[in-house]
Image (cartoon, rainbow, N blue to C red):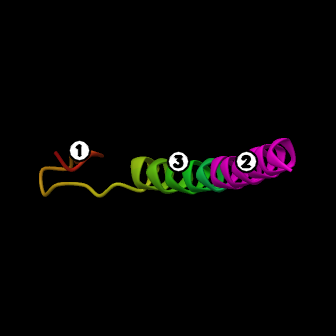
């Protein structure tokens, strides 16, 4: 009974980690696309120069 519980807990843990990592990959892709859009669609200053593409 003990080894079965250990295997089930390990499977549950690995499934949860795999789902979380998959979700984090999708979040990273969305952030990358938004960053690239902000990089290419940045505004211009009154002097005609391009603005900084980052906020800090």
> Which of the two residues, 51 or 3, is positioned nearer the viewer here?
3
Q: Earlier in the sequence, mark 1 or mark 3?
A: 3
Q: CA distance from mark 2 to mark 3?
A: 21 Å
Residue topped by disc 3: 32
Q: Nearer the viewer, mark 2 or mark 3?
A: 2
Residue topped by disc 2: 18
Residue topped by disc 1: 52
Majority secondary structure in the magenta region: helix
Residue at the image point whose x is 21% and y is 50% from the top? 55
Residue 53 image point, x, y percent:
30, 46
Magenta highlight range = 1-22
Residue at the image point whose x is 65% and y is 56% from the top? 23
Left or right relative to 11: residue 22: left
Left or right relative to 5: residue 48: left
Q: Nearer the viewer, mark 1 or mark 3?
A: 3
Q: Earlier in the sequence, mark 1 or mark 2?
A: 2
Check the image and name the residue furthest to the front.
1
Identify the image quadrant of residue 45. bottom left
């Amino acid at each position: 009974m003990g080894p079965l519980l250990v295997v089930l807990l390990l499977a549950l843990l690995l499934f949860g980690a795999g789902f979380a990592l998959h979700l984090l990959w999708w979040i990273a892709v969305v952030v990358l696309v938004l960053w690239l859009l902000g990089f290419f669609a940045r505004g211009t200053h009154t002097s005609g120069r391009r603005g900084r593409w980052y906020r800090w």
